[in-house]
Amino acid sequence: MKKKIIFSSLLFCAATLPVAAQNDFNYNEDSQFRPQTNRKVNTDSLGSDKEIPKGIRVWTVDERFGDTKAAVVDTLQHMYMNTTFTEGLRGEYNTLGNMGTARLNRIFIDRRNTQGNFIFTEPYDYIVNPVSDFHFTNTYSPITNVTLNSCGDKVTGEDDFKAMFAVNANKRLGAGFRFDYKYGRGYYNAQSTSHFKYTMWASYLGDRYQAHLLFSTNHEKMTENGGITNDDYIKHPEIYTESFATNEIPTVLEQNWNRLDNQHIFFTHRYNVGFSRKVKMTEEEIKAKKFAMASKKENAEEDAKEEARKKAKEQGKKFDEKAYDKQQGAKFSGRPDGAKIAGDEPAKDSAAKDIRNDSTRIAVNGKAAADSLLVIQKKNAEDSLFYKSEYVPVTSFIHTVKFDNYRRIYEAYQTPADYYLNEYYDAGRLTGDSIYDQTKHWHMKNTFAIAMLEGFNKWAKAGLKAFASYDLRHYELPTMEGGFEKYNEHVLSVGGQLSKQEGKTLHYNAVAEIGLTGVDAGTLAIDGNVDVNIPFLGDTLQVRGDAFFHRETPSFYYRNYHARHLWWENNLDKTIHTRIMGTLSFPKTRTKLRVAVDEIKNYTYFSQSYDITEEGLRTGVMVTPMQESGGINLLTAQLEQNFRLGILNWENQFTYQHSSKESVLPVPAFNAYTNLYIKFKVVKVLNVDLGADMRYFTSYEAPDYSPYMGQYTVQGNGENNVKIGNYPIVNVYANVHIKHTRFFVMMSHINAGQGDKNYFFAPHYPMNERVFRIGVSWNFFN
């Protein structure tokens, strides 16, 4: 109750912030966040009020080359209410129900390997983010963002907190930090999660030298309950003689935890060789320079006044501030009193004759012409202040280094009898029915590249890069004696890139990399995309093609894994994965269509099997790495179609998938998300989205979850495999934006208890029932 009172007070304060003290914001074509200033404000009588330039520009960085790409600032009102969900903005992820649990995307073409060979952090990509997703910042003034989303109470609730600060020392050097904390206590038994993340970054964007630095440290802790013992507690509660609250439903495990600790350092820098040219500043840069000039002038005037005040005091005189201000205002306003012409005044006739005969002088006929000339000269002088020297790089020498350090611990204080099929040793930190499994991994990758940038001469319109990478990987696995066995992998690879990003009509990018040494010898990765932008019906129709061919070595942990109850050392063939995808986008009709075809050979995955007792407990649990030697074909078609009629908005995303081997690569045939809302303003400053959204997928044998591995697996129980899906989850919400503040109120899963109650996003892991949620996000400019 106390939390709700505090949160309600915060929302009230956010909704009643003084309007006159804030600015509206929008986005320009470079994804800059900037204020609208077409309004009148009250200034003080001295005219010393100056508007502090506000705005932020963000961009992402390519993990291999450090190339930058403009991004959109994460301060949008749209879909803010769904940012707290582990199941994604559109409910496209399978999860274990609670915030902060492991997840897996049901849309196969959207799955990404973001964690390299350390598979254990892959299900937590919402907190252990890849470098390519991070937003570097450039701000006109220091900016702070604080976000808090919450629900429930101190026993079962969820808290999602973020704080970010970014600042620039000058226009080239920027830095910032961010703190993330997710705490999901869990509405079901033994389900709590907690995630801590601290991130620091810095960037320097000089003409010749550029650098980006990113550091993050993360801690994830997940309590594993193994799912509920019987799905009928959710589907058919009427068969029980007593009713159960969600936290009273029996679960398979208690006092079992997965812990992940990881640290990441990324540094990329380059030296550019090129030439300089003059270009006009952007509106934001002009505004910032005018602010700096006004500040400098005001500081100089204040210093002069203070000096005059001190001088008067030293002379024993009283300082007359009004007279001083009047004198300064009159200064240079006209010809000084008593001014005389030095030297002899020339005769009028001879002077006029000399001027007429002087060919070096410009003839100005009339006062109007003279005034016009003075205005032009003054404007040219002012305009010259707002041009900047732009350095055009031609060749770049690039170095990127990336270091990642990981540790995973599976710890259990009690394990049900006969829960695991095998036991390989009983040694180490914990024995008996307790478990303490640990694995460690770190890797360092250096990449060196030379780039001939796009348009470097008239004969070569595309950009060219050549690169070489060296990757050192280190792993540690437990031995049967309680120690650790160490593994090292050394991988050298080379490759190149051909790209064209300038212009409006045609863009393309192709990258190829081949492994030369170590376990990755013979690997090959070719990735490419091309887009054509065609003017059509007053808008732009974009046709885009993406394709790749990957021949890659399966992750180390598919090939080698040692734990107390699981043990394997496998020789696996290289996986061959090919994809061809086409995308059609037309903003005028708000339509986007994606069609993709995947073909995979030697697909590698986990399979989990176990028996279920009459009491619903598991026995004989076994997880096995598998490799499908035959080919798998997957067809995907996705349509995004949005409609708007006045204040009414209807957004839709429909996805069809067909896998040729559902037993190996299961996907739902149909996945849908729809969002119906009205968008309106209150008193011109309060933007409101009021509506309901729904996520749905058809029934299928979804991947099971292995607490012991912390991974999603194929169900390996044959006829006892279970299906989930064919159940819609509906949320209703009010999403509000006022000036610098966003907030929402929501009732999630409002249809809980209706229909067949099959609200599982993973086998035996039910979703939360009806929950009231609130969230608020502030931006502060110093």
Image (tube, rainbow, N blue to C red):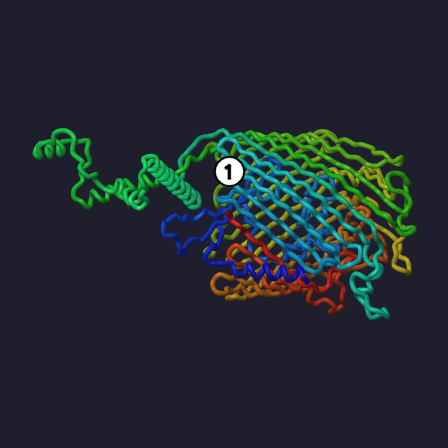
Q: Residues within 10 Å of mark 1 (few under 14, many from 20)?
A: few
Q: From the top left corner, tell me how far across and down residue 70 is, in percent.
A: 53, 44
For disc 1, the marked residue is 169
- Residue toward you, 9 or 354: 9
Q: Disc 1 on helix, strand or loop?
A: loop
Asked if residue 356 shows in the view, the reply is yes
Q: From the top left corner, tell me how far across and down residue 672 is, in percent.
A: 66, 60
Q: From the top left corner, tell me how far across and down residue 410 is, in percent.
A: 81, 44
Left or right, 273 with respect to 447, comes to: left
Q: Is residue 617 above or below residue 177?
A: below
- Residue toward you, 319 or 769: 319
Residue sitting at x 76%, y 53%: 192
- Residue toward you, 674 or 465: 674
Residue found at the far front of this picture: 316
Q: Is residue 530 above or below residue 639?
A: above
Q: Quadrant of the N terminus?
A: bottom right
Residue type at the position of mark 1: Ala
Left or right, 419 with respect to 92, comes to: right
Q: Is residue 741 above or below residue 66?
A: below
When asked about the image quadrant of residue 696, the answer is bottom right
When asked about the image quadrant of residue 590, the answer is bottom right
Residue sitting at x 71%, y 31%: 472
Q: Is residue 499 above or below residue 583?
A: above
Residue sitting at x 79%, y 59%: 723
- Residue toward you, 253 or 498: 253
Q: From the top left corner, tell me how far across and down residue 631 is, in percent.
A: 75, 46
Asked if residue 94 shows in the view, the reply is no
Left or right, 182 with respect to 234, comes to: left
Total numbered circles:
1
